[in-house]
Amino acid sequence: MKHGIHPDYHPVVFRDATTGAEFLTRSTVTSTRTIDWPAAQGVQTYPLVVAEITADSHPFWTGDRRIVDSAGQVEKFRRRYGQRRG
């Protein structure tokens, strides 16, 4: 790797906006918000990034099945195009 051309890779805490679950990982993302995180050396301060969806709340990982059908879009499609025969 060339020195000085890559972004800073540092510890960051991500928080799931839906469940509130938090996890510490490394990332290049930056944030002005911070959080105190307990560590072996005592409490450390890390940047905090709030994510809308993480593995903690994503339907694929949680097993929840969500069907979003706003204003009957499926029925509207079927009325418009009906059953086509080949």
Image (cartoon, rainbow, N blue to C red):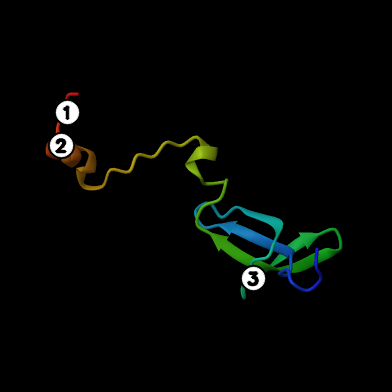
Kindly report the distance in space between the C-alpha atoms of the residues bearing marks 2 and 1. Answer: 7 Å
Residue with the mark numbered 1: 84
Residue with the mark numbered 2: 81
Q: Are marks 2 and 1 in contact (CB under 8 Å)?
A: yes
Quadrant into which the N terminus falls: bottom right
Is 20 displayed left or right of 65 in the figure?
right
- Name the quadrant containing residue 23: bottom right
Please tell me which residue is depicted at 80% across the width and 67% down the height of the picture.
Answer: 2
Secondary element at tag 2: helix
The percent position of residue 57, horizontal first and vertical second, equals 52, 46
Amino acid residing under circle 3:
Thr
Q: Which mark is residue 30?
A: 3
Question: Quick one: label 3, few (<14), some, or many (20+) residues within 10 Å?
Answer: some
Amino acid residing under circle 1:
Arg
Please tell me which residue is depicted at 79% across the width and 66% down the height of the picture.
Answer: 43
| Front residue of 75 and 24 | 75
Instruction: Name the outermost residue toward the front.
Output: 86
Mark 2 vs mark 3: which is more N-terminal? 3
Kindly report the distance in space between the C-alpha atoms of the residues bearing marks 2 and 3. Answer: 48 Å
Question: Quick one: label 1, few (<14), some, or many (20+) residues within 10 Å?
Answer: few
Secondary element at tag 1: loop
Instruction: Name the outermost residue toward the top.
Output: 86
